[in-house]
């Protein structure tokens, strides 16, 4: 008799996995399986996100996204919850992906706003309500809603964000990258004050300690594909109100911030792939155009910054 599926809890450390490609830019399924196994083996993580920005979802076909779900569940089984990204400009396609994810045993969805909303979607909130309605009609899975940086013109105005959470009970958390400390704290507080409180998972990886200290319930970050163990240690220290330990761990994380998140930001996941090659956890680093491989000087910069963080080939866990 099958055991009842556990309920997904949107808190703690949730790494977002990368998607390895071969030299001919096909998905490297073998490398992907090893990557999932590597990240999934980190003690203390609360789940793994796939088909997100870290996986270069913008460059994946729907069929490749579907295959990623199947492979992820095959590797992780029910040991680690699987959160599937819903990234598309079509509400109909979003519903199809959501239904497929639920059918294949995913535990939750990470819903991105459609890119075309940059043209003024904040003035027509009924459009995003309809997008979420299509998704929730197709799937009963818990939803993590992606709150974009304000500068992107894809961020939900706070009244819209709160109304989405009221209308759709399946929204259990926000992945927050608003990029504004003032708004970030206000969102955390107002989401917790709802009749049905909604958690905040930060993705402000460039100022992670400060963000967690404001009261976030966890983090969801592509950097977890490389340093999930350090993220777990930092989150636990903050939860324990152990500022001294948190600052010491943050000092180790900081060189990786410079390695991954220096300008231009769109190279962040390219750099993470290079880091995994340097650490011996990925054989090759290839990205699909228009993204391009970092130059030799930048790769050497990443190598040096990983060394400053105490990371080298064979590194596995916090000392």
Image (tube, rainbow, N blue to C red):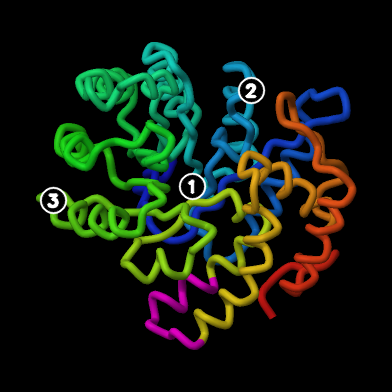
Percent x, y for residue 203? 47, 52
Percent x, y for residue 264? 65, 43
Q: Which residue is mark 1?
A: 81
Q: Is residue 276 left or right of residue 118?
A: right
Seen at 36% across and 22% down, the residue is 117
Q: Which residue is mark 2?
A: 60
Dot 2, how many residues are within 10 Å of its Cα: few (below 14), some (14-19), or many (20+)? some
Front position among marks 1 and 2: 2
- The span from disc 3 to disc 2 (Cα, nearest Å) is 36 Å
Q: Secondary structure at mark 3?
A: loop
Dot 3, how many residues are within 10 Å of its Cα: few (below 14), some (14-19), or many (20+)? few
Image quarter in which the C terminus is found: bottom right
Which residue is more in the foreground, 123 or 188? 123
Q: Secondary structure at mark 1?
A: loop
* Label 3–label 2 contact, CB within 8 A: no
Sequence-wise, the earlier of marks 1 and 3 is: 1
Instruction: Report the magenta residues as a range.
Output: 233-244
- The span from disc 1 to disc 3 (Cα, nearest Å) is 26 Å
Seen at 41% across and 35% down, the residue is 109
| Label drawn at residue 194 | 3
Q: Is residue 273 above or below residue 99?
A: below
Q: Is residue 240 left or right of residue 45?
A: left
Visible residue check, residue 1: no
Dividing the picture into quadrants, the one containing residue 259 is: bottom right
Pick out the residue farthest to the left.
195
- The span from disc 1 to disc 2 (Cα, nearest Å) is 22 Å
Q: Is residue 187 left or right of residue 313?
A: left
Percent x, y for residue 209? 47, 70
Q: Secondary structure at mark 2?
A: loop
């Amino acid at each position: 008799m099958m055991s009842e599926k556990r309920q997904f809890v949107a808190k703690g450390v949730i790494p977002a996995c990368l998607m390895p490609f071969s030299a001919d830019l096909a998905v490297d399924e073998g490398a992907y399986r090893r990557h999932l196994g590597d990240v999934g083996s980190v003690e203390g993580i609360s789940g793994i996100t796939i088909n997100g920005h870290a996986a270069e979802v913008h460059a994946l076909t729907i069929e490749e996204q579907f295959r990623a779900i199947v492979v992820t569940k095959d590797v992780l089984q029910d040991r680690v919850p699987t959160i599937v990204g819903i990234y598309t400009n079509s509400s109909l396609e979003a519903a199809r992906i959501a239904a497929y994810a639920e059918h294949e045993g995913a535990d939750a969805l990470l819903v991105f706003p459609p890119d075309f909303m940059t043209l003024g979607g904040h003035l027509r909130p009924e459009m995003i309500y309809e997008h979420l309605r299509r998704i929730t009609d197709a799937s009963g899975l818990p939803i993590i809603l992606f709150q974009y940086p304000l500068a992107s013109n894809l961020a939900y105005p706070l009244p819209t964000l709160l109304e989405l959470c009221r209308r759709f009970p399946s929204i259990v958390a926000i992945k927050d990258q608003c990029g504004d400390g003032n708004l970030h704290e206000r969102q955390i507080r107002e989401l917790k004050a709802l009749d049905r409180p909604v958690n905040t998972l930060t993705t402000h990886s460039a100022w992670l300690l400060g963000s967690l200290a404001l009261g976030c319930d966890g983090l969801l970050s592509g950097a977890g594909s490389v340093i999930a163990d350090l993220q777990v240690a930092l989150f636990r220290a903050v939860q324990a109100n152990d500022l001294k330990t948190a600052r010491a761990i943050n000092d180790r994380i900081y060189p990786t911030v410079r390695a991954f998140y220096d300008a231009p930001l769109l190279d962040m996941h390219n750099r993470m792939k290079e880091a995994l090659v340097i650490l011996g956890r990925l054989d090759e680093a290839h990205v699909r155009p228009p993204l391009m491989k970092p130059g030799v000087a930048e790769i050497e910069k990443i190598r040096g910054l990983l060394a400053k963080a105490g990371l080298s080939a064979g590194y596995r866990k916090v000392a």
